Image (tube, rainbow, N blue to C red):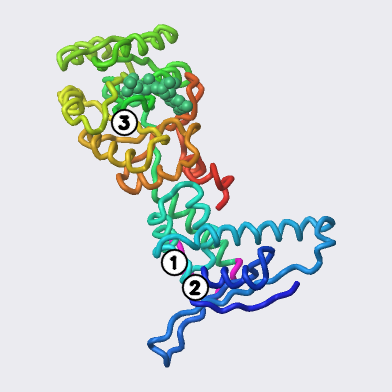
């Protein structure tokens, strides 16, 4: 191995020089921050990068370990190069925490925003002892980041038999058009009915879309469930009264654009009547982060109890879920991962949720 030490003002410059002088095959062997000299208050922190080129090319195919290590090094360089052109928040994180390169890249590949990724890494590295070796630092950093993520989000299996009061639990699903509210209700109803042996009733308060009630009724018919439409608060009161012997009543609402405040308020007026309805905000992970955030804000007038994240099978990256939870902190009750009723429904635990969010592009490990 031909090794050399490079000093530069920042990691981007170091990588550029390494590539120029050693070529694209170069591997980063170690990185270190050099603090400015105490007697030079105007000086700047520098970075020191040890890079090298392997000279034993012929043995590579025989040596699996060596190949794995080369692959890991290349992955690290790729991560660094990918990160090099990004915002100043990254730059700060990388200068103070070189070990975080891989973790940061994993977050970004999963679609977590730059801002949140940096904040989580900074929190995870705060208070870490200075005298740890690089490998131990990386191990602890990964562990702490996972901890941060787990602490950041909560899950709640909301749809359990809870009628201690003797009254059914009434749960409504609200959210933008076409996110999968009706389909999710059908999946959930099947799970509650057949796996949890609960008595389930369905109500559709979707008066807008032609065939909306028929869609729900078709599912109810297959499962042998009671299903009624409700066009007003009076109808809803009657429906709930007729179903008072149930364990759980699921209410399907009409999807509306989050810009249509008037229609959202119409549903709100229905729900607000004193029915003790819990609301579950249904959002599709295929939406752009900004749309998801705006929709969540618009539907927050319902005071939702949990999130339901749908269509994770269609989303390339699910990291936006972490940003959404960071923006509006609610537990996640359900996630859905396909069109099949009733199969494609998951009641996630926290580990499953973290894997869903970070695992798609990180294979579960950061
Ligand atoms: N790929 C995928 N498709 C889904 C999922 N959930 C629902 N869908 C599909 O999304 C489409 C819309 O589903 P609906 O359940 O009708 O959506 P909705 O929110 O009730 O729609 P509106 O009532 O019109 O607001 C259907 O084609 C569903 O099969 C999912 O988890 N993954
Ligand atoms: Mg619907």
Residue located 26% across and 26% down the image: 256
Residue 280 is tagged as 3
Q: Are marks 2 and 3 in contact (CB under 8 Å)?
A: no
Q: Which residues are magenta?
A: 124-135
Q: What residue is shown at x 38% (from left), y 40% (from top)?
A: 288
Mark 1 → mark 2, Cα distance in angstroms: 8 Å
Q: Residue 324's quadrant in the figure?
A: top left
Residue 144 at x, y percent in the picture: 48, 59
Q: Residues within 10 Å of mark 3 (few under 14, many from 20)?
A: many
Q: Which residue is mark 2?
A: 10
Which residue is more in the foreground, 87 or 242? 87
Asked if disc 1 and disc 2 are in contact, CB closer than 8 Å, the reply is yes
Q: Secondary structure at mark 3?
A: strand
Q: Position of residue 232 (x, y in %)?
A: 17, 15
How many neighbours does mark 1 have within 10 angstroms: few (below 14), some (14-19), or many (20 or more)? some
Where does the N terminus fall, quadrant-wise?
bottom right
Q: Which residue is mark 1?
A: 91
Residue 49: quarter of image: bottom right
Name the residue at 28% across, 15% down.
209
Q: Is residue 274 visible?
A: no
Q: Is mark 3 within 8 Å of ligand 1?
A: no
Callout 1 secondary element: helix
Viewer-proximal residue, 346 or 196? 346
Question: Disc 2 on helix, strand or loop?
Answer: loop
């Amino acid at each position: 191995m031909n090794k050399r030490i490079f000093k530069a003002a920042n990691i981007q410059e170091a990588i550029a020089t390494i590539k120029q002088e050693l070529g694209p095959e170069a591997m980063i062997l170690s990185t270190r921050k050099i603090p400015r000299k105490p007697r030079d208050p105007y000086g700047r922190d520098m970075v020191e990068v040890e890079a090298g080129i392997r000279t034993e090319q012929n043995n590579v195919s025989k040596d699996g370990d060596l190949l794995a290590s080369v692959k890991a090094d290349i992955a690290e360089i790729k991560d660094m190069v990918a990160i090099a052109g990004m915002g100043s928040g990254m730059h700060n994180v990388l200068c103070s925490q070189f070990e975080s390169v891989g973790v940061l890249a994993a977050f970004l590949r999963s679609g977590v925003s730059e801002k949140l990724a940096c904040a989580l890494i900074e929190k995870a590295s705060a208070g870490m002892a200075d005298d740890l070796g690089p490998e131990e630092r990386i191990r602890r950093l990964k562990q702490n980041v996972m901890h941060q993520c787990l602490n950041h989000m909560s899950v709640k299996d909301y749809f359990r038999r809870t009628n201690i009061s003797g009254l059914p639990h009434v749960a409504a699903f609200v959210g933008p058009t076409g996110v999968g509210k009706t389909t999710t209700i059908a999946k959930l109803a099947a799970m509650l009915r057949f796996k949890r042996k609960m008595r389930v009733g369905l109500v559709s308060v979707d008066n807008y879309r032609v065939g909306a009630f028929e869609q729900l009724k078709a599912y109810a018919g297959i499962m042998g469930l009671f299903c009624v439409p409700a066009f007003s608060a009076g109808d809803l009161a009657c429906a709930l009264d007729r179903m008072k012997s149930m364990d759980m009543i699921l209410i399907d609402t009409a999807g509306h654009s989050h810009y249509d405040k008037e229609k959202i308020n119409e549903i709100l007026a229905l729900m607000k009547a004193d029915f003790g309805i819990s609301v579950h905000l249904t959002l599709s992970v295929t939406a752009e982060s900004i749309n998801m955030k705006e929709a969540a804000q618009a539907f927050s007038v319902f005071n939702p109890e949990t999130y339901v994240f749908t269509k994770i099978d269609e989303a390339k990256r699910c990291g936006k879920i972490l940003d959404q939870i960071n923006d509006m902190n609610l537990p996640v009750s359900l996630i859905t991962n396909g069109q099949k009723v009733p199969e494609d429904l998951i009641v996630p635990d926290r580990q499953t949720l973290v894997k869903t969010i970070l695992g798609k592009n990180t294979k579960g490990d950061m």
